[in-house]
Image (tube, grey):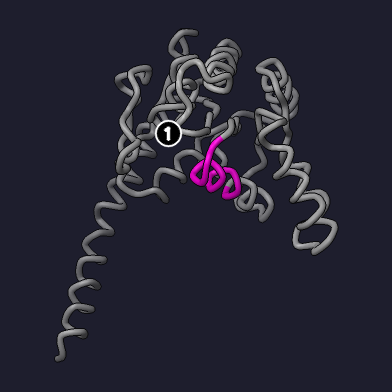
Amino acid sequence: MNKHNKNWNEIKTNDSWALFKIMSEFVQGYERMSQIGPCVSVFGSARLKPGDKYYELAVKVANKIVEQGYGVITGGGPGIMEAGNKGAHLGGGTSVGLNIDLPFEQHFNPYIDSDKNLNFDYFFVRKVMFVKYSQGFVVMPGGFGTLDELFEAITLIQTHKIDKFPIILVGKEFWSGLINWIKSTLSEQFKTVSPGDLDLIAVVDTEDEVIELLDQFYNQYDLSPNF
């Protein structure tokens, strides 16, 4: 056996044992999240600080969400995630953090309920928890991670892998360029998405509009896990 084959076999063995850790994260996540009740996820940049207009708007949005009886789920870190947990905490509602170990920017924020602070090593397990247990996605301005979570949810709904739920983008000045590109380039020019796919997304500017869309949807549909 040459050196390359030996190294490859060692990798395969390590991959097999990693399955047990992956399974344990799924089991822990399912057991804890299933006890929490209906929640709305708030996504956005980890880099926005207190005082930034979208940080402060995320606090207001989360506060309004818990006033309506939902809990709030975030990625558990700083920035918009902190703002979402802060709004839920100040409103006396359920405040959940799904943390992941990242270099430089991820550390859990102080506004997460102590019994609802979950830690993950695997992005894909964490994303399953967001999608399965969220009754809606409220997406504030963010970067690649925010866009990843947004488009994964849209894809899963579009392909009927999960039930439809509200996907609400907050901040027309931030999102309008992306929405226009999807409409003009993807839908109209290249026809790589259907015109109706844009109906999966709503774009708003205020916390009251967020609540109005959540209420409109759940006046028609039951609250339940998405798959």
Q: Does residue 73 appear in this view?
A: no
The number of discs equals: 1
Mark 1 is surrounded, within 10 Å at the Cα level, by few (under 14), some (14 to 19) or many (20 or more) other residues, namely: many
User: In the rendered image of this protein, does residue 186 appear above or below residue 69?
Assistant: below
Q: Quadrant of the N terminus?
A: bottom left
Q: Foreground residue, 109 or 79?
A: 79
> Could you say where residue 4 lies in the image, as x and y percent from the top left?
20, 84
> Where is residue 45 shown, x and y percent of the image?
49, 34
Q: Quadrant of residue 101?
A: top left
Report the residue at 72% width, 42% height from top: 177
Work out whether residue 106 or residue 123 is closer to the camera in this orientation and state it.
Answer: 106
Q: Residue at x 78, y 57 (%)?
A: 185
Residue 150 is a magenta residue? yes
Q: At which x and y percent is residue 196?
A: 81, 49
**Percent x, y for residue 14?**
21, 66
Query: Left or right: where does residue 95 sit relative to residue 56?
Result: left
Which residue is pictured at 64% across the width and 43% down the height? 163
- Give the vertical position of 82 relative to 147 (above or below): above
* Residue 185 in view of the camera: yes
In the drawing, does residue 113 fall left or right of residue 92?
left
In the displayed structure, does residue 201 sit left or right of residue 57? Answer: right
What segment is highlighted magenta in the picture? 142-152
The residue depicted at 83 percent of the width and 51 percent of the height is: 195
- The quadrant in which residue 217 appears is top right
Image quarter (top left, top right, bottom left or bottom right) of the C terminus: top right
In the rendered view, would you say 212 is above or below 108? above
Looking at the rendered structure, the secondary structure element under dot 1 is loop
The amino acid type, in three-letter code, at marker 1 is Gly
Q: Nearer the viewer, residue 99 or 172?
A: 172
Residue denoted by label 1: 75
Q: Is residue 102 magenta?
A: no
Magenta span: predominant SS is helix
